[in-house]
Amino acid sequence: HNYKTVYAFAREMHPKTEKFDVQYGTAGFRAKASTLGYVMYRMGLLAVLRARYKKGCIGVMITASHNPEPDNGVKLIDPCGEMLEQSWEKWATKFANVGDDQLEEVINEIVTQLNIEMTQRVEILVGKDTRPSSPSLAKALCDGILALSGKPIDYGIVTTPQLHYFVYCRNSRHEYGLPTEEGYYRKLCNAFKKLRGQKFDVGNYSNEVFYDGANGVGAKKIKYFQECLGDSLKIGMYNDELIGTGKLNYMCGADYVKTTQSFPHGVPQEINQRCCSVDGDADRLMYYYLDEDKKCHLLDGDRIAILIAEYLKEVVESTGLEVDLGLVQTAYANGASTKYITKKLKVPVSFACTGVKYLHHQALKFEIGVYFEANGHGTVIFKKEFKEKLRSALKDSSSDEVKSAIEKLLVVIDLVNETVGDAISDMLLVETILHSKGWSVQDWEGAYTDLPNRLMKVSVKDRAKIQTTDAERRCVKPDGLQDAIDAIVDKYNAGRSFVRPSGTEDLVRVYAEASTREEADQLALEIALKVY
Ligand code: 16G
Ligand code: ZN
């Protein structure tokens, strides 16, 4: 076939401007927005090919998440709302890096190799965050989609998890919900209100939360919830600067709170007030509060995961059904959290490599799979067969108690965005659980004590020299490094440490935890010196 117009469009409107190769990484392409025009155009082409290959609609999200405002990025969303299948990442990388005049050739290559039928009319859902560069990048993307006769459907400014949700809704023929913003809000709000009932303050739980929108899309979209939930959850929203003021993620947002372990700017410093932050595309959530000494206490992804797993375990037990429930963590999960969940709650934990797609994949193995990264990205997935089991048990059971337990669980399922971590849906779930237990944020924190930990970055000549195994918890290359790490770790009380090459930056990350702050710092330093 000849795809002459594809080349002409590329040459005239979106020529390749960068000499350096880019790579489709853990979360798609990410770079300075000004360099991304041609990458977007090409991802438009690839999106059409992917949709035709999968015979369904797919999504393309334009965002650089928690990165600074001048950055941008793009990631593809597969038909079931999950991240682009890994085997296609190499195609994405190839498409982004060939010369303009080679585009026809790679299109022919992929079409032939994968036997893609090029006459299908396919829809590509496009979403973007609030970055000022996003509209023009979306234009480049749509040009690519149109060049191969795909049909772009522009959802405008939406959160990343909203777009994942829309893609799945469309492909599931609305079985999962309506693929509109309205449908999304209604599904979550209805579920939340049902679970909340008429009593809003219970025990130590007060129904007001401060919410940091990171000056991004999370601030824009929470307004629908504020309106719809009314008094059932008072959401005090902060950090909603106008688009283009440069404030996106600046000194606020989930990533800022987690990495600096400090209270964000722009949120009133009220003692003991439960607060949460989302990131620039609202797929990460972090809880925290200030104590009397103005010390900031973090309740991160590990805490959220454990709260959710424990709650689900209780709800499932009340249905009387057997269920295989498990938690997926990464090497970064605090050792105290892993110990608590396995020893105390007896919920099995399995470990995955860093990056949402790995956790998601692992969680699919359980009937109910809870997964979270410590940085606050995560969700719960319920197996289709499990949902069917619930529905038929609801029909068959003669006990009213069991029936209402199952009904409750079905509503909880509706509150969860299973397609990907969704900060707003996660927040509503956390609020539901705290409410049902009558817990303050301190009660929640009291379940266990985190081990002090330290994260360090080490610059090295070639980070690829470090290779890991066992979900990144052990090093296999270079020779001898793991033995050296083991010997050092042995000297520390409750010591644990690992090193891994970053998937997003050119450096190696060192993580260490131990029984005291001093020991954790010292351990991290000793290991970093070994890596350097
Ligand atoms: C990406 C991942 C995030 C992970 C981070 C690790 C997604 C959507 N995002 O941002 O989950 O924690 O990379 O970065 O998968 P690192 O490899 O530089 O430590
Ligand atoms: Zn994000």
Image (cartoon, rainbow, N blue to C red):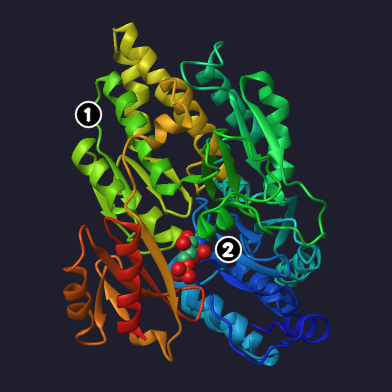
Q: Residue at x 32, y 70 (%)?
A: 522
Quadrant in which residue 395 is drawn: top left
Residue 521's place in the image compared with 77, above or below, is below
Residue 34's place in the image compared with 478, above or below, is above
Which residue matches tag 2? 76
Q: List x then y, in percent, for residue 409.
A: 40, 25
Q: Residue at x 80, y 63 (%)?
A: 132
Q: List x then y, in percent, for residue 254.
A: 57, 52
Residue kind at label 1, given as amino acid type = Glu
Residue 100's place in the image compared with 260, above or below, is below
Residue 185 is at least partly visible in this image? yes
Q: List x then y, in percent, for residue 374.
A: 42, 53
Q: Give the side of residue 339 with respect to residue 159, left or right.
A: left
Of the image marks 2 and 1, the number of the one nearer the N terminus: 2
The numbered mark at residue 44 is none
Ligand 1 under 8 Å from disc 1 Cβ = no
For the C terminus, the quadrant is: bottom left
Q: Residue at x 35, y 78 (%)?
A: 528
SS class, disc 1: loop
For the N terminus, the quadrant is: bottom right
Which residue matches tag 1? 322
Residue 51 is at least partly visible in this image? no
Q: Residue at x 32, y 61 (%)?
A: 331
Q: List x then y, in percent, for residue 278.
A: 60, 48
SS class, disc 2: strand
Q: Residues within 10 Å of mark 1 (few under 14, many from 20)?
A: few
Is 115 or 129 nearer to us in this picture?
129
Residue kind at label 2, given as amino acid type = Leu
Q: CA distance from mark 2 to mark 1?
A: 36 Å
Pointers 2 and 1 in contact (C-beta within 8 Å): no
